[in-house]
Amino acid sequence: MRGRPELEIETEKVYKTKKNPNGTFIARIIQVPREENMLDFILEIKNPKKKQFSYKRVLVTTENEYHSFRLARGDLTWVSLNTLAVWDGLGHKLVEVAASTGKENYRISDEHCSAYREKK
């Protein structure tokens, strides 16, 4: 069947998982349904040595609609050994986090985020 896929996400779902080459940190993006037709995309970074999350925050909230959904689904990349960045489908860096401490080195503003999403 051609066309846009139906986006029925009723429960929390892990979208993407990333592991450092040496296995030190685990990061993942989780899709969490909200009221009506909205989704939260949450970034979690876990330090296995300490067995706790160093970072867990909502990256973006989007409509469960094909274009905004596709933009929000980020790509996880390791900028350095201990720094993780999330890029959206348009090539905007959403956030950069020091994985061991959970400190944000960079985060796109909500105003900027909503402005480019409206352009589609």
Image (spheres, helix red, strand yellow):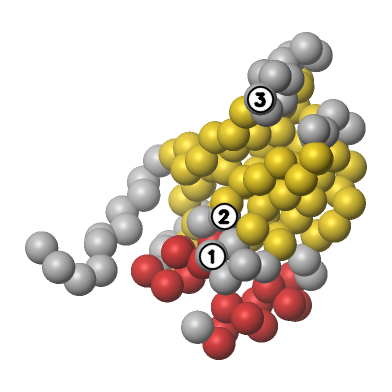
**Can I make out residue 62 in this image?**
no
Image quadrant containing the N terminus: bottom left
Q: Residue at x 25, y 60 (%)?
A: 6
Residue annotated with mark 2:
74
N-terminal of the two: label 2 or label 3? 3
Q: CA distance from mark 2 to mark 3?
A: 20 Å
Q: Amino acid at mark 2?
A: Gly
Dot 1: within a 10 Å radius of its alpha carbon, few (fewer than 14), some, or many (20 or more) residues?
A: some
Q: Is residue 58 above or below residue 81?
A: below
Residue appearing at x 56%, y 84% in the figure? 118
| Mark 3 and mark 1: Cα distance apart in space | 24 Å
Q: Nearer the viewer, residue 25 or 11?
A: 25
Vertical position of residue 27 compared to residue 36: above or below: above
Q: Secondary structure at mark 2?
A: loop
- Viewed as shown, does residue 41 lie left or right of 51? left
Q: Is residue 11 above or below residue 100?
A: below
Q: Which picture quadrant has residue 64?
A: bottom left
**Residue 23 horizontal/vertical position (percent):** 67, 19
Contact, mark 2 vs mark 1 (Cβ under 8 Å): yes
Q: Amino acid at mark 1?
A: Gly
Answer left or right for 79 relative to 40: right
Q: Position of residue 73 (x, y in %)?
A: 51, 56
Residue at 71% of width from left, 25% of height from top? 25
Which residue lies under the disc numbered 3?
21
Disc 2 crowd, CA 10 A, few/some/many (<14, 14-19, 20+) = many
Quarter occupied by residue 84: top right
> Which residue in the structure is indicated by mark 1?
89
How far apart marks 2 and 1 lie (CA) works out to: 6 Å
